[in-house]
Image (cartoon, rainbow, N blue to C red):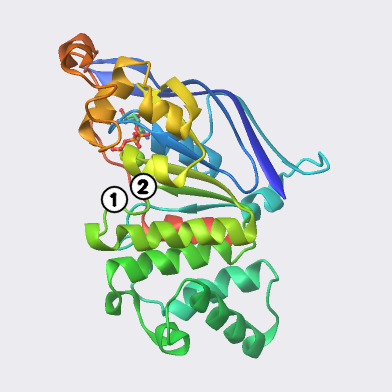
Amino acid sequence: MTSVEVANLVKEFTVRKGLAREKFRAVDQVSFTLVPGRTVALVGESGSGKSTIARILARLEKPTSGQINVALDDGTPVGGSMYRRQVQMVFQDPFASLNPFHSIEHHIARPLQIHHRAKGAEQTHERVVQMLERVNLEPAADFAQRRPHELSGGQRQRVAIARALAPGASVVIADEPVSMLDVSIRLGVLNLLGRLQREDHLAVLYITHDLATARHFSDEILVLYKGRIVERGPADDVILDPHHDYTRLLALAAPDPERLGKVVSSENVPDRSTLDNSICYNHFTASWEEAEVRATA
Ligand SMILES: Nc1ncnc2c1ncn2[C@@H]1O[C@H](COP(=O)(O)OP(=O)(O)OP(=O)(O)O)[C@@H](O)[C@H]1O
Ligand SMILES: [Mg+2]
């Protein structure tokens, strides 16, 4: 089993301001730990730095400074190709993250073969079918033959989850895995992630805007605001008794019947104008090329 320790992570981007170039700190001294069998939720509004942290963990981006130590139970450090195999990502957009020219079978067979988890065509096909069954895509042999456009968004995201697990992942970074799916099917996909996490004892980083699902699906919550963790703690404590104004704001945006009338009474509703609002709202999502490279690197 694999744990991840992130310490003082910093990511600076150079941005243009008129003719000048300025450094912008998207991630600022972030530290947290992911352990097997537990889910940590990273919540924060758009532009707060969530995906940047995910991309650094998935080695799609280099940090400016800070340490990421990945180790097995006995302390053996995990690096190089073992790191790339064990730390996998589920991207936000299931439409962009699958290659439209390849079958579903191909998407899962590639990482299985590249990471030596199946030998020969027959065994590979068998394992692909098993993986599709694990993510409840049945009849699996039929789904294996299809191309991405023949699947719904929820079904595609299940394929993306199977692909992330195919290399033998023990750490899964799920970057807003259900935010682009229809509300009615989100819970099904999150429940699937929860089941796989328990079955495989995965360490999961669940990135979301949504405090309600963060509370339900995670053990610990980290609240990110402008690249910094402003509040952290056991999921129930953070939601039911938020200390930071920004967490209260997020909590207000996701009403929870248990909390209403309790913590958030009218006098402790924070004023949005007192919080610095100079955040960019760019959206970064992965292309299928990038997603493919990540699963087969
Ligand atoms: N390659 C880049 N170059 C310059 N700025 C970047 C780059 N990638 C991200 N940023 C900036 O860093 C900040 C954090 O972006 P990030 O994508 O991590 O936010 P996020 O919390 O994932 O937002 P969202 O909820 O919209 O996905 C944003 O202000 C963004 O504009
Ligand atoms: Mg993001």
Q: Which of 203 and 173 is in front in this view?
A: 203
Label 1 is placed on what type of residue? Ser
Q: Residue at x 65, y 62 (%)?
A: 168
Q: Which amino acid does label 2 sit on?
A: Glu
From the viewer's perspective, is 15 left or right of 135?
left
**Quick one: 259 or 43, which is closer to the camera?**
259
**Where's ligand 1: which quadrant?**
top left
Q: Image height check: is 251 above or below 215?
A: above
Q: Which residue is drawn at 24% across and 36% down?
A: 254
Which residue is painted at 70% across and 46% down in the image?
2
Name the residue nearer the viewer: 257 or 182: 257
Name the residue tied to disc 2: 176
Residue lying at 44% horizontally and 64% vertically, measured from the top left: 160
Query: Residue 179 — which label?
Result: 1
Packing grade of label 1 (10 A; few <14, some 14-19, many >=20) is: some
Mark 2 within 8 Å of ligand 2, using the beta carbon: yes
Would residue 182 be visible to someone looking at this image?
no
> Label 2: how many residues lie within 10 Å, few (<14), some (14-19) or many (20+)?
many
- Could you give the CA–CA distance between mark 2 and mark 1, rounded to whole angstroms? 5 Å
In the drawing, does residue 139 fall left or right of residue 64? left
Q: Are marks 2 and 1 in contact (CB under 8 Å)?
A: yes
